[in-house]
Image (cartoon, helix red, strand yellow):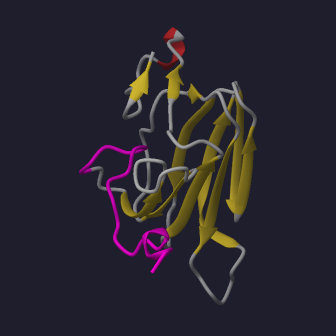
Amino acid sequence: MKYDKNFIFKGSPSIQHYAGDPWWIPLMRIDDNFIKGASYFECVWIIENINNSYKPHCHDCDEYIGMFGSNIKDPFNLNAEVEFWIDDEKHVFNRNCLVYIPAGTWHTPIIVRNLEKPIFAMTTSPVGKYIQKVNRDPKWSHLPDPPEAES
């Protein structure tokens, strides 16, 4: 059938996280590497607290990040506390959240505390290849580089 290739049922390695990181389970990813012309979209389960995230990074395109709790009896409760950095602003939330990150805006680290139930997280950008530039400000030197980082 013509569109069989457009259905992805098998997980793939994440480009945003290192293999073996204990706090997440990669679910699905799509981009131009999988289907010619497809935009980047990825989703993971966060299953443990995240105490040490990556250096801030930015992209030449907009990015959207979503985090959603998994308690169907309280569907808007994230069942965790998330610290999310965008530029030099620290935002803390414990409810489901969608974040719009304009092109060229530094973002992360993301810290997850007091995780009681898994979080479904997704990220997407209107580009076929996910490329990031890392913030080399010395104040972030204690954090590791994100995977597939371009300086």
Q: Can I make out residue 57 in this image?
A: yes
> Magenta residues?
1-20
Q: Which residue is painted at 62% across and 45% down in the image? A: 83
Which residue extends farthest left? 20
Which residue extends farthest top? 138
Q: Nearer the viewer, residue 111 or 41?
A: 41
Q: Which residue is painted at 69% across and 83% down in the image? A: 74
The quadrant in which the C terminus is found is top left
The quadrant in which the N terminus is found is bottom left
Q: Which residue is painted at 51% across and 60% down in the image? A: 114
Looking at the picture, does residue 24 appear above or below residue 116? above
Overall secondary structure of the magenta section: loop
Looking at the picture, does residue 148 appear above or below residue 63? above
Which residue extends farthest bottom? 73
The quarter of the displayed image where residue 58 is located: top right
Looking at the picture, does residue 130 appear above or below residue 58? below
Is residue 44 shown in magenta? no
* Left or right relative to 94: residue 7: left
> Residue 24, position in %: x, y?
38, 59
Q: How many marks?
A: 0
Q: Can I make out residue 143 in this image?
A: no
> Residue 17, position in %: x, y?
38, 45
> Residue 19, position in %: x, y?
26, 48
Is residue 2 shown in magenta? yes
Looking at the picture, does residue 98 appear above or below residue 52? below
